[in-house]
Amino acid sequence: MNGQISILGFAGSLRQGSYNRALLRLVVELVPNSAKLEVFELDGIPLFNQDLESSPPEKVKEFKRKIKAADALLIVTPEYNYSVPGVLKNAIDWASRPYGDNAFEGKPVAMMSASIGMMGGVRAQYHLRQSFVFLNMHPVNKPEVFINFASQKFDDKGRLLDEKTKELIRELLDNLVAWAKRLKIA
Ligand SMILES: Cc1cc2nc3c(=O)[nH]c(=O)nc-3n(C[C@H](O)[C@H](O)[C@H](O)COP(=O)(O)O)c2cc1C
């Protein structure tokens, strides 16, 4: 490795035209030179079954491997019913198990959310922050990136049109990289 911070990003939506997946694609372009971002797609992860947690499906094993290898994580998610989408929560549950093999242990993490509503996914982010406590993760506090009225801020090719939001995303990524560097040498 050349001193770059490796970030693993994943989105809480499987939808082809997802604003959140589009955001993750944009992040690949905005990430600072001192870091690189790999996107992990959550589709294909089956529903969590605790009977299988010690010998999980291949896709879960791969997810856990990549989380453990990454210096930092980036979660980009919509809000479903005022909370975390099941797809994302399910993936987190798998990767946190079995007890004693929590892939998220000690990981720096940043979040963004996009929603078509007025609140921009704030409730999903705060529910995620609650899970980060149990997972013993280290979230970046600021800036908080909530993209509201997403249908007006992306074009029909999924490109984010709002320059101010792009600036905020750059700041969040810079802070995540700085945070990961601090935690790495701590
Ligand atoms: C099951 C479901 C629940 C939703 N609940 C919320 C919600 O609580 N708050 C909100 O702002 N939007 C909610 N939405 C609308 C989403 O913001 C919108 O579908 C958004 O485009 C989803 O993100 P995506 O484009 O990345 O798939 C909900 C959508 C679905 C399908």
Image (cartoon, helix red, strand yellow):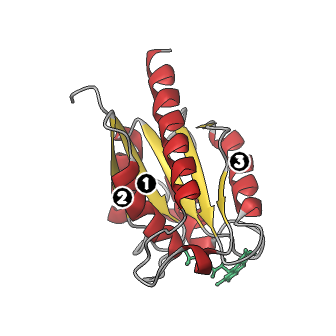
Q: Residue furthest left?
A: 1
Q: Are there few (<14), some (14-19), or many (20+) residues within 10 Å of tag 3?
A: some
Q: Quadrant of residue 42?
A: bottom left
Secondary structure under tag 1 reads: strand
Q: Which of the pair 142/180 is nearer the observer?
A: 142
SS label for mark 2: strand
Whether ligand 1 has any atom under 8 Å from the Cβ at mark 1 is answered as: no
Residue position for label 3: 129
Total tally of numbered discs in the picture: 3
Residue lying at 77% horizontally and 67% vertically, measured from the top left: 119
Distance, label 1 to label 2, CA atoms, is: 5 Å
Q: Position of residue 157 (x, y in %)?
A: 40, 81
Q: Amino acid at mark 1?
A: Gly
- What type is the residue that disc 3 sits on? Arg
Residue drawn at point x = 45 percent, y = 85 percent:
156
Q: Residue at x 35, y 64 (%)?
A: 59
Bin the neighbour count of mark 2 within 10 Å (Cα to Cα): few under 14, some 14-19, many 20 and up.
some
Q: Is residue 109 left or right of residue 17?
A: right
Cα gap from disc 3 to disc 2, whole angstroms: 21 Å
Mark 1 and mark 2 residues within 8 Å of each other at the beta carbon: yes
- Looking at the image, is mark 3 or mark 1 earlier in the sequence? 1
Q: Relative to the observer, which residue lies in front, 94 or 125?
A: 125
Ligand 1 resides in the quarter of the picture at bottom right
Identify the residue under disc 2: 39
Residue 9 tag number:
1
Q: CA distance from mark 3 to mark 1?
A: 16 Å
How far across and how far down the image is residue 5, in percent? Answer: 35, 34
Position of 49 relative to 1 (above/below): below
